[in-house]
Amino acid sequence: MTKLVIGHFYPDLLNLYGDRGNVLALYKRAAGRGFDVEIRQISVGDEINPESLDICFLGGGQDSEQNIMKDDLVNVKGRIIKDMIEDGKVFLTICGGYQMLGKYYKEHDGKMLKCLGAIDYYTEAEKERFINDTIYELELPSGEKVRIVGFENHSGRTYLGKGVEPFMKVITGHGNNGRDGYEGMRYKNAFGTYSHGSLLPKNPEITDMLIELALKKRLGEDYKLPVLDDSTERKARELALSYIENGKEQMI
Ligand code: GLN
């Protein structure tokens, strides 16, 4: 049986707004197809074996938590993580975790937090926080466009550099910086987004895309993920969309 290992980085520090739900969604939709899935928790001081990891996940955290894990990320695990990203390993990073793979995060009082610099983008915080339910448009590898529902809560504004693509387009909400209409980033198979814990549970296309990318790396580029029923996840999204479009909080 093919094994799929999800590395959940800094789960004790980067864990806002149910971000663990994303890891559970990856687990459920891979295990539901018969894969043997392991979730490995990796925090400050833990060693990583890059060969054994298929999907790496970093959640969101407050500025104070980002300050705690940054030395371990930048000075201890940094070289290995940069090599994994260049090698096309699948990463999903959320909010604080997303910011930490870029060049730097400047807090709104001007304090500089040097980040990993694995990918060309930077983040500068402003006083006003962006806190709201969000709707984005994602173009799937097939060319089909889907509406993605999410929730954002951040003061950082992220600006993408050369060779880094936006992940999605903003329909409702602020996304990367509230100015350019884009949300998140994609570089090779590394993704960043400001959307928190309900991103994958309510948007199965993204979950499946990440699992398929990871399995292509393990089993060959021609690998196609078998279809798995996603009617419950889609129903949750439709309900959330209907709440947001009617000016209410999505509540689920
Ligand atoms: N500290 C960051 C910000 O406010 C990240 C917050 C988060 O992960 N929700 O921009």
Image: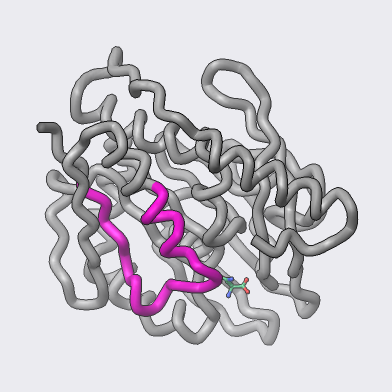
Quadrant occupied by the C terminus: bottom right
What is the x, y in percent for residue 218? Answer: 19, 29
The residue drawn where x is 41% and y is 49% is 25
Where ligand 1 lies, by quadrant?
bottom right
* 138 relative position to 66: left or right: right
In the rendered image, the residue lying farthest to the top is 222
Rendering quarter of residue 237: top right
The percent coordinates of residue 207 (x first, y second) are 45, 40
Residue 11 lies in the magenta-colored region: yes
Identified at 26% across, 46% down, the residue is: 83
User: Considering only vertical position in the picture, is 163 above or below 236?
Assistant: above
Comparing 179 with 200, the one in front is 200
Quick check: 49 left or right of 241?
left
- Against 20, residue 185 (above or below) is above
Task: State the extent of the magenta-drawn residues as a range.
Answer: 5-25
> How many numbered marks does the figure carry?
0
Furthest residue to the right?
A: 246
Quadrant of the snapshot with the N terminus: top left
Residue positioned 22% across, 34% down in the render: 34
Does residue 234 appear left or right of residue 91 in this picture? right
Q: Position of residue 214 (x, y in %)?
A: 30, 35
